[in-house]
Image (cartoon, grey):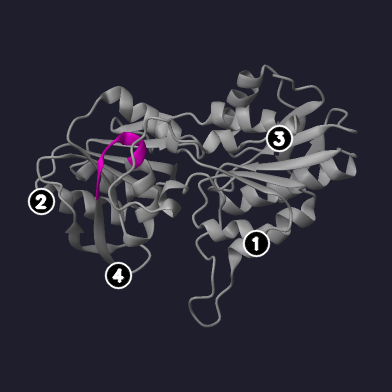
Amino acid sequence: MKVNNLVIFSGNTNPQLAKDICKCLKVKIGDALVSEFSEGEIKVKIRQNVRGKDVFVVQPTSPPVNDSVMELLIIMDALRRASAKRITAVIPYYGYARQDRKDQPRVPITAKLMANLIANAGADRVLTVDLHAGQIQGFFDIPLDHLFAVNTIVEYFKKKKLKDLVVVSPDVGGIKMARAYAKRMHAGLAIVDKRRRNDIDAEVMHILGEVKGKNVVLVDDIVATAGSITEAVNALKRKGAKQIYVAITHALLSGPAIERLKKSELKELVVTDTIPIPKEKNFSKIKVLSIAPLLAEAITRIHNEESISILFKAPTNAKKIKGATDEDEEYFRLG
């Protein structure tokens, strides 16, 4: 792979992922100081020449969210003023995405605000993974490449060789994602019909589909307080499901999440490393998969002005699910 004139920098949110990406690309991570002044303001200094370079800044906007956002913006501003040729914001987890429309009076659209801030700070391009809502791509007036963790997660489950497998969507809104996973895993499909009481708790109403005697993989993009997930796991168990796995791209694990997951009948929580999991939140049921190879391949292709659509393709032997539409079949080809 050709990576001439390419430099990768990282903020303090997920430096290990940035290092893993650099390892895949066989390049050194960029030399930058990202610290704080005595009163808490973020201090950035780029300590190497980036004039005319193709620069990638790896920084998920995950907890501590506001610090992560400001670090990203200030790093890009420093790079722009240092005459970098092109700046790509690599945002494995795009925070402030859950307010993506005005669904109540007098509420903001923070996903759009974030897009404006990122572009105005100096980003020429954005690379992200599993956006909370696909329409966020339209909030950007600069190119955005939207990757999916599906192949990384599916490869892991294929190695387990689980039989009688059903992929479950935790709500009606996630059915397209669940169908795309089911297609790749040659599995059945079920849906959890839930009612959200508030932003922390949800109540499962019905299970649509056959899960009795089946091994289940529940798929979603984000797990925050784990209220919806654990309610779904318990409901699936009551319906006779055997082993229940949960596959999540972004593991926020906030509030009572860990306590809830430990008490649930979950077999394993499979997540990616878009967000680092602190040691105090890690426990035996969590399996972390690396998306560094995926991001490294995408960065290489962007750097060399090559298409990244090949990264979305399903295996050629994946069979079509009964009832799946062409839109479902193309769910992971949005790049």
* Magenta segment includes 24: no
Relative to 156, residue 69 above or below: below
Residue at figure coordinates x 17%, y 35% from the top left? 164
Dot 2, crowdedness within 10 Å: few (<14), some or many (≥20)? few
Residue indicated by mark 3: 302
| Residue 187 picture location, percent across and down | 26, 39
Residue at figure coordinates x 73%, y 50% from the top left? 73
User: Which quadrant would residue 205 be assigned to in this image?
Assistant: bottom left
Give how far apart the Cα atoms at labels 3 and 1 are: 21 Å
Name the mark on residue 70.
none
Closer to the camera in the image, 166 or 12: 166
- Quadrant into which the N terminus falls: top right
Residue at figure coordinates x 63%, y 33% from the top left? 298
Element class at badge 1: helix
Task: Specify which label sits upstream in the sequence, 3 or 1.
Answer: 1
Q: Amino acid at mark 1?
A: Phe
Dot 3, crowdedness within 10 Å: few (<14), some or many (≥20)? some
Element class at badge 2: helix
Element class at badge 3: helix
Name the mark on residue 238.
2
Q: How many marks?
A: 4
Give how far apart the Cα atoms at labels 3 and 2 are: 47 Å
Left/right of residue 43 with respect to residue 190 in the rendered view: right
Label 4 or label 1, whichever lies nearer to me, is 1
Q: Amino acid at mark 3?
A: Ile
Residue indicated by mark 4: 197
Name the mark on residue 139.
1
